[in-house]
Amino acid sequence: MAEAKGPATKPVSNRDFDFFYQGLADGALLVQQCDGCGALRCPPGPSCPECRSFAWTALPLGGTGRIFSYTVHHHPPLAGFATPLPVALVEMDEAIRMVGPMDDTAPDRLRIGARIATRFVERDGVAGFRFVLADA
Ligand SMILES: [Zn+2]
């Protein structure tokens, strides 16, 4: 495994994403829930793709789900991450999919359908999250 190159980079944020990063700092995995129709959305956006409402509420997820798909990133190096870096698309138990790193999981342990949990991390002053195998 290649060592992490450099410190973690601070994610670029904007008014749509600020709540998400603040949630991570507070130990919560947040998605937007439309106040108009109740649809969940991730990644964040200014309006609901279902009903076009601009009104929404931050909904904390339970942090558990199943791997829907995954890939293993090898190149180029990513600041703050070692390679190979497993990255999973997870079907959260709330029926919304999220992408997240699984850098504490050996790539050969990844399986479609495996149960995952969420772990919150802080590195170099940057709050983040990792998906981990629930049985690990
Ligand atoms: Zn809506």
Image (spheres, rainbow, N blue to C red):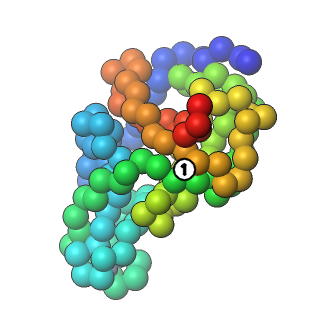
Quickly name the residue at label 1.
99
Residue 57 lies, in percent from the top left, at 22, 64
Q: Residue at x 24, y 68 (%)?
A: 56
Left or right placement of residue 52 versus residue 131 in this view: left
Q: Residue at x 34, y 85 (%)?
A: 51
Outermost residue, front side: 135
In-front residue for pair 105/57? 105
Query: Image quadrant of residue 1?
Result: top right
Query: Image quadrant of residue 26?
Result: top left
Q: Would you place residue 34 above or below residue 114 in this image?
A: below
Q: Is residue 129 visible?
A: yes
Q: Amino acid at mark 1?
A: Val
In-front residue for pair 44/94? 94
Residue 65 lies, in percent from the top left, at 52, 53
In-front residue for pair 91/48? 91
Neighbour class for label 1 at 10 Å: few (<14), some, many (≥20)? some
